[in-house]
């Protein structure tokens, strides 16, 4: 008869070779979501958008990340997450690493949220529209006309050139925005973060119905706030009860959104429901080197706001003239969709850059946060670590600023998982296990400790991923799978020498 431990080992391996279980369904949608974009193949859930006017989509996928444009002139790339939806009611956090380099700084990249009921969106205008805003034009440049993003709710631009925020009124480009900016460096101040609001709806359709060129998709998308990242240059903020713009002279750091080839930044975008259920508080932070700077801090994006359609004339667009633009205030209904879809776009013009992003994470505010662990052991010797000691779970009312603790975790929610978060573990009385060719992993619910037993004569690095959630004592909403941590990695170095046990958080240049 075979040794009992050998039989158990074989059973665990056979079970673990089965197909991973799907992630549990959640009322909040497809949180949490992770995509590294570090593959040469196009991820199955990522769709390349079809640009308007027959323009090619320059987006490509590589081991370095999603490259939206090369550093060549007049390029445009755009993608969206096709089959993932994210409920809006609890807010949303989006973070990703990015780099813009290789050219002379144009045009930048955008992140956009749109109504998930729009399955396949019409992507917005290229160039300074960054795939979000519209572009109207007179008849001499009719090929340049493009509607804004269909179903658009919010566009966030990392604008390296400066045109996304400004009102433009010339032959080939007519779009609302901050008026009376010149082409001088002091006015355009490249390197700024700008928010544009929702697509114009029925109110704008009625108000501007007699103006040629201002049909569906050619109104709305107003600039809400724009803040430079360089020095003390002023930003601009919409007066949403009057439609005019006020200068903001708040210092927001002194760094360039662009970087060198290996100088990745991290963008962190948070939408948090306001206390009066009247929209979102929007915060955009940029991590650059070892510093994190809040560029837009809790901008109140209301469900209803006034703005100025300030790039049209009563004669409309269907002519060959370029008269002085007219401005009229309008009230925009920025109703919040039940669920969001999310996408990304980037453009070049006569000036260029490579625009690349990677390590995309989409979570709910208050979600559990798990961090990588690392330990060492001798060949054939089990090692036990406190893998949760550097992880954070939350409890109580969800707020913008919260203090978490490792004691808030529900240890029975621990899962061994694959990169997508799908469960690959095998439950046993009091814990869960996962078997691989190089050893057996076991997590004990009572001790909250993780043990790895190396297989046979294995020497080298073994690794496994896990996720976990808070919701101790079934606390709502943390007990929902949407509040699980993203998968994190435990690495064990199995060495022939004396074991050295540790549990340190593994970090790179970007935290």
Image: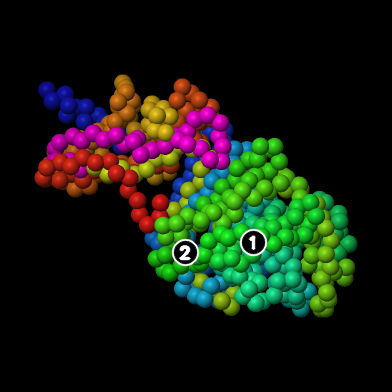
Residue beneath the point at 82% across and 78% down:
321
Which numbered circle lies on residue 285?
A: none
Where does label 2 land, which residue? 99
Query: Is 463 positioned to the left or the right of 315 in the image?
Result: left
Q: Secondary structure at mark 2?
A: strand
Q: Is residue 463 above or below residue 442?
A: below
Above or below, 425 against 127 in this view is above
| Horizontal side of residue 452 vs 488, given as left or right | left
Q: Quadrant of the N terminus?
A: top left
State which region is magenta.
Answer: 376-404
Q: Is residue 442 visible?
A: yes
Q: Position of residue 301 (x, y in %)?
A: 68, 48
Q: Few, some or many C-alpha atoms within 10 Å of disc 1 (few <14, some 14-19, many ≥20)?
A: few
Kind of element beneath mark 1? loop
Give coordinates of residue 359: x percent, y percent. Answer: 44, 53
Frontmost residue, 329 versus 362 = 329
Q: Are marks 2 and 1 in contact (CB under 8 Å)?
A: no
Name the front one of labels 2 and 1. 1
Q: Is residue 48 above or below residue 474?
A: below
Q: Residue sitting at 21 percent across and 31 percent down? A: 9
Would residue 23 be visible to someone looking at this image? no
The residue under label 1 is 249
Examine the structure image and report whether residue 386 is included in the region drawn in magenta: yes
- Residue in view at x 75 percent, y 76 percent: 171
Q: Residues within 10 Å of mark 2 (few under 14, many from 20)?
A: many
The answer to which of 98 and 42 lies nearer the viewer is 98
Magenta-colored stretch includes residue 82: no
How far apart marks 2 and 1 lie (CA) works out to: 27 Å
Relative image position of residue 112 (x, y in whole percent): 60, 54
- Image label count: 2
In terms of sequence position, does the residue under pointer 2 or pointer 1 come before the other? Answer: 2
């Amino acid at each position: 008869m075979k040794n009992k431990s050998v039989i158990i080992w074989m059973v665990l391996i056979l079970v673990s070779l089965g197909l991973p279980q799907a992630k549990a369904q959640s009322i909040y949608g497809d949180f949490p979501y992770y995509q590294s974009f570090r593959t040469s193949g196009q991820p199955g859930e990522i769709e390349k958008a079809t640009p308007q006017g027959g323009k090619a989509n320059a987006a490509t996928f590589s081991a370095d990340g999603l490259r939206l444009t090369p550093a060549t002139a007049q390029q445009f790339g755009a993608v969206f997450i096709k089959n993932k939806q994210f409920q809006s009611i609890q807010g949303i956090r989006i973070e990703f690493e990015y780099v813009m380099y290789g050219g002379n700084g144009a045009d930048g990249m955008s992140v956009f949220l749109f109504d998930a009921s729009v399955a396949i969106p019409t992507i917005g205008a290229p160039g300074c529209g960054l795939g979000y805003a519209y572009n109207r034009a007179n008849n001499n440049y009719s090929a340049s006309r493009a509607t804004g993003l269909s179903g658009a709710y919010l566009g966030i631009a990392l604008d390296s050139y400066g045109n996304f925020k400004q009102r433009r009124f010339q032959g080939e480009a007519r779009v609302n925005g901050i008026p009376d900016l010149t082409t001088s460096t002091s006015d355009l101040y490249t390197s700024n973060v700008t928010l544009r609001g929702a697509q114009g709806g029925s109110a704008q359709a009625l108000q501007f119905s007699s103006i040629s060129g201002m049909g569906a998709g050619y109104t709305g998308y107003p600039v809400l706030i724009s803040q430079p990242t360089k020095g003390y240059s002023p930003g601009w903020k919409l007066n949403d009860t009057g439609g005019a713009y006020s200068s903001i002279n708040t210092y927001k750091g002194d760094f360039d959104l662009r970087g060198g080839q290996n100088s990745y930044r991290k963008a962190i975008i948070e939408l948090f429901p306001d206390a009066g259920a009247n929209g979102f508080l929007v915060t955009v932070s940029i991590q650059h080197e070892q510093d994190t700077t809040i560029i837009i801090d809790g901008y109140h994006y209301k469900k209803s706001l006034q703005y100025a359609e300030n790039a049209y004339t009563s004669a409309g667009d269907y002519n060959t003239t370029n008269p002085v633009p007219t401005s009229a205030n309008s009230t925009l209904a920025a109703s919040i969709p039940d669920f969001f879809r999310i996408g990304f776009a980037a453009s070049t013009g006569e000036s260029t850059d490579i625009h690349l992003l990677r390590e995309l994470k989409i979570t709910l505010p208050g979600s559990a946060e798990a961090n990588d662990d690392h330990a060492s052991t001798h060949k054939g010797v089990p090692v036990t670590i406190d893998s949760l000691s550097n992880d954070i779970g939350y409890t109580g009312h969800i707020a913008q600023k919260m203090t978490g603790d490792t004691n808030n975790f529900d240890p029975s929610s621990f899962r061994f998982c694959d990169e997508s978060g799908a469960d690959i573990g095998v439950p046993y009385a009091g814990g869960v296990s996962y078997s691989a060719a190089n050893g057996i992993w076991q997590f004990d619910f009572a001790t909250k400790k993780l043990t790895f037993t190396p297989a046979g004569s294995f020497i080298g690095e073994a690794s496994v991923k896990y996720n976990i959630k808070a919701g101790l004592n079934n606390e709502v909403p943390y007990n929902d799978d949407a509040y699980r941590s993203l998968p994190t990695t435990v690495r064990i170095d199995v060495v022939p020498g004396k074991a050295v046990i540790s549990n340190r958080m593994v970090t790179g240049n970007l935290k």
